[in-house]
Image (tube, grey):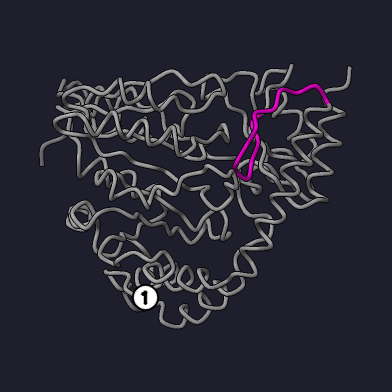
Amino acid sequence: MTHWDEDKRARPLVGQYIETLKPYVPGKPIEELRRERGIQGEILKLASNENPLGPSPLALEAARAALLEGHLYPDGAAFVLRNRLSEYLGVDMARIVSGNGSNELLELIVRTFATSADHAIVSEHSFIVYRIILKSMNVPFTVVPAAADMGHDLVAMARAARSNTRLVFVANPNNPTGTYNGRAELEAMLSILAERPDPPLVVMDEAYFEFADAEDYPDSSRYQGLYPRIVALRTFSKCYGMASFRVGYAVATEEVAGYLHRVRAPFNTNRIGQLAAAAAVDDEDFLRRTLELNRVERARVSAALSDMGLEVVPTQANFVLCRTPLLASDLYDKLLDRGIIVRPLDGYALDHHVRISFGTPPQNNRLIEALREVLSP
């Protein structure tokens, strides 16, 4: 057997686009904070936009039943879930693709429709995972400056398209800013792109779709007739409280969905998640309670933060972005000492901004009191 020669100068294991890639850093887990700082009391996690009511009860009931058949492979076609979504959304099942959360669908779209010879467009302050996925697959992209409200400038994004632009990513509502783009803005962008000889695929990431209640908020799954190359991405992680189940879905034309089905892994959504998500679609009472809680607490917490002198970005999601006089990392650290986890956004080049998820009224009261202590002179 030949011994390994440590002095060998072989080519690098990865390309430069992987070598320079920084991994996505999720919100700090509760268990990690407890280990690090020895906190014994209740830890409040307001960093990851999770549902404070927990999972849908109907989803939990379906999951328990599905556990008894945990030895079986999932249905590769996710028939029960896609069929239920087809009925719920009023679209043909052939237009729906299930995914391991909407995050996997983002990766699937890039892998299916773009190469290193192509080009993509993202917005400043949009979900950083778009850039990570594009970099990991060596797809060049342009970052278009944000609009005045820190959201997407859709017309500027459309005008940034090149002859080889294959993908345009739009988060609506946007994470981490909570901003949204209305119907007129979306239609203006699509109108510009439709004039191109080879229009790009517009990926509408609507992870916070259910929380948006603005009158002009657009449902992009209804735009395929106007612009066939548009894909709406949704998830059960947020509103339905199923982040651990990892279930998302895409609504596209049959052509686009067909290509995604060719590339996706055969068992990309687990059996328990599929059946739990299908049951959650019918949990109207849970959905109503979730949305009402968020509507009330969104207004109350945003007002309280503004009263403290913080700059609050108006939000259509289940979180709020605010600018603080402290560095985001310092505020984050001071709140960790009090058993509260928020999300500093220095990774987004927003060194003085934190993103705070809305919890239950008692949880939000605790957050507000802690912020007053930390920010007091």
Percent coordinates x, y for residue 37 in the rendering = 73, 38
Residue shown at 79% from the left, 39% from the top: 367
In the rendered image, which quarter contains the C terminus? top right
Q: Residue 19's quadrant in the figure?
A: top left
Please say if 337 is above or below 230.
Answer: above
Percent coordinates x, y for residue 8 in the rendering = 16, 22
Residue shown at 30% from the left, 59% from the top: 97
Residue shown at 83% from the left, 25% from the top: 308
Percent coordinates x, y for residue 33 in the rendering = 67, 42
What span is in magenta? 308-321
* Residue type beneath disc 1: Val
User: Would you say 353 lies left or right of 305 here?
Assistant: left
Percent coordinates x, y for residue 291 in the rendering = 65, 56
Please say if 112 is above or below 343.
Answer: below
User: Would you say 155 lies left or right of 242 here?
Assistant: left
Membership of 218 in magenta stretch: no
Q: Secondary structure at mark 1?
A: helix
Residue under label 1: 80
Q: Residue 9's quadrant in the figure?
A: top left
Residue shown at 77% from the left, 44% from the top: 39
Q: Nearer the viewer, residue 375 or 289?
A: 289
Please say if 227 is above or below 160.
Answer: below
